[in-house]
Image: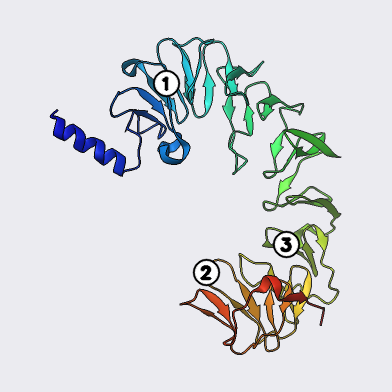
Amino acid sequence: MSRLLYLFLIIILIQSCKPGIRVDSKNSDSYYYQPVSFLIIYSPRGNWFELDYRVLSTLPWNFKVLSEDIGKNNNAVFYKYHKQTNFDIESFTVNNNVIKDKNFVYTISEQNSFIPILGADIKTFIYLKPNSVNQLVWAKDKHRFYFHDKPVKVDFGTFNFINENYFYDKDSIYTTYNTTIISIDVFQGKLIPINNQYSKNNSKIFFFGYDKYRKLPINNFDAISVIADNILKIGDKIIFNGEIFPINDVDAKTFTVLHKNSNYYKDKKHIYYNDTILSNDIKRFTLLFDDNKEYPAYSKDSRHVYWGGKIVDSINVDNFHYDNKLHKWTDGNSIVDADIATKKSTNR
């Protein structure tokens, strides 16, 4: 390679904001060959301008990338740039997030070292994916379940997931508390899912919200229909967040969601925000959107502009709109800032 071509390649690398040539582009965007010294370096996601990089104490020709943040050579294993040697190097692998050698399955400590998950079965240990935020929260092997890489005392044969925050076996219903699970109710039998937040058995409806657990006795299971994740219609009743809807004259037959990404609902009589009446002006009530078309930013009827469940003060309702040039809400006279211009709505 000519010196001119080599310099040209270095310039391209610098302009691309990458610290070098990726060792294994399929498995990691954090391990690189340094363009000048050709040493192995670790740079988190290649962001060497903001996050810097570290040089690894390894020769480049025997370094193997195992995952985004794990690699090894003939003598050591590296987590990011932290070198560790107390492993069977030859059998050390990372597959579907499972870190193991012929002796142990490992987890990563707060000190950036690999420590054994004691008792884990090497051949059958796998991570489960009932948690959308952290897919390494739950695991199992042929003997037991693990929560944050620690075995949990549940009945292995009947343990099951209701949603990301609630679980059950033949004896108990559980939820999470920090990095452990706790029993919140004695349970006998089997839960049948209705949707992500509701389940049933032969005598009760169970609500499993993100921070709420409730149960209701039910007589007519044939009359259950799903309106939203947190809302059921059972006969002439609306069940909202696990409780009977607090508005006595709610019309269950016409109750519906106004927009899937909002907390606005309506029936033939009222507009609701959550479980509170917001407006009776059914015909003129409108949801209003800005650049973000997925969520309504405001709503209005013939009398008021609303921000969530609150009335926005001193607004010209007829002229209230989103200015596409300013990217601001205005009523024609002034820019509207709902954070400082709202008051609680009342049931009307």
Say if residue 186 shows up in the picture.
no
Q: Residues within 10 Å of mark 2 (few under 14, many from 20)?
A: few
Dot 1 amino acid type: Leu
Dot 2 amino acid type: Lys
Return the residue at label 1.
56
Where is residue 237, by image quadrant?
Answer: bottom right
Q: Kindly state the secondary structure of the residue where label 1 is placed.
A: loop
Mark whose residue sits in front, 2 or 1: 1
Q: Residues within 10 Å of mark 3 (few under 14, many from 20)?
A: many
Residue 347 pos. (x, y %): 82, 79
Q: Earlier in the sequence, mark 2 or mark 1?
A: 1
Residue 111 position (above or below residue 182): above
Q: Earlier in the sequence, mark 1 or mark 3?
A: 1
Return the residue at label 2.
293
Q: Residue furthest left?
A: 2
Q: Earlier in the sequence, mark 2 or mark 3?
A: 3
Q: CA distance from mark 2 to mark 3?
A: 24 Å
Mark whose residue sits in front, 1 or 3: 1
Dot 3 amino acid type: Ile
Return the residue at label 3.
231
Residue name at image x 73 percent, y 50 percent:
210
Where is residue 332, by image quadrant?
Answer: bottom right
Say if residue 102 shows up in the picture.
yes
Q: Are marks 1 and 3 in contact (CB under 8 Å)?
A: no
Residue 259 pos. (x, y %): 61, 70
Residue name at image x 54 percent, y 10 percent:
86
**Count of residue discs:** 3
Q: Are marks 2 and 1 in contact (CB under 8 Å)?
A: no
Q: Quick one: quadrant of the N terminus?
A: top left
Q: Residues within 10 Å of mark 1 (few under 14, many from 20)?
A: some
